[in-house]
Amino acid sequence: MPQNLEYANEFFSFLTGKATAAMGRRLQKNLKEQGVLITAEQWSILYYLWIEEGRTQQELAALTFRDKPCVSRLIDNLEKLNLVMRVIDKEDKRSNLIFLTKTGRQLRQTGLQQAEKTLSEALNGLAHEDMIRAKDTLELLYANLK
């Protein structure tokens, strides 16, 4: 356990706040430059649908570490942009399955390219060993709090 609480507070604030916010802002900027007018949060929903369509809102909430009302709002907005559609699950009428529209599928290549560009920008100058150490640290933090 860190002996210097001030350092620990700064450390966690940076890891969980500043870095995440900066990545989201940069992703959104990179997407906008390519004419893709979605938020980083909306991108995260699309990302998991590009991997596999027909997920439930509950699955998307778990995958993106968001609560169900937040995911519901994101899906509402993605529907307004004609990027996704809700379909009632035939096996469970209380549940909606989320599918991409043609327009949503067409964003895949550009969306993934801009995410890769954003990661490249974020990792610029970072040694591979440092990246692995940071990843291991964050995974341990997550496991400790799970």
Image: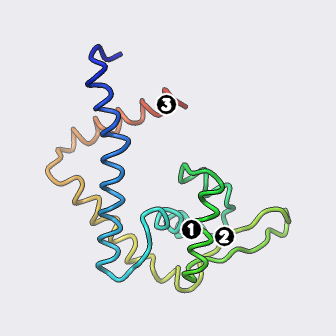
First reached walking from the N terminus: tag 2 or tag 3: 2
Name the amino acid type tagged 2: Ile
Q: Which mark is residue 143?
A: 3
> Crowding at label 1, few (<14), some or many (≥20) Cα neighbours within 10 Å?
many
First reached walking from the N terminus: tag 3 or tag 1: 1
Tag 1 residue: 49
- Residue at x-position 85% and y-position 66%: 93
- x then y, percent, for residue 15: 33, 40
* Element class at badge 1: helix
- Residue at x-position 29% and y-position 13%: 3
Tag 2 residue: 98
Q: CA distance from mark 2 to mark 1?
A: 8 Å
Q: Are marks 2 and 1 in contact (CB under 8 Å)?
A: yes
Q: Which quadrant is the C terminus positioned in?
A: top right
- Residue at x-position 62% and y-position 71%: 76
**Left or right: 62, with 119 as reference point:** right
Q: Are marks 3 and 1 in contact (CB under 8 Å)?
A: no
Q: CA distance from mark 3 to mark 1?
A: 26 Å
The residue most toward the bottom is 102
Residue 84, compared with residue 122, is above or below; it is: below
- Residue at x-position 59% and y-position 57%: 70
First reached walking from the N terminus: tag 2 or tag 1: 1
Residue 75 sits in quarter: bottom right
* Element class at badge 3: helix
> Crowding at label 2, few (<14), some or many (≥20) Cα neighbours within 10 Å?
many
Q: Which quadrant is the N terminus positioned in?
A: top left
Name the amino acid type tagged 3: Ala
- x then y, percent, for residue 81: 54, 81
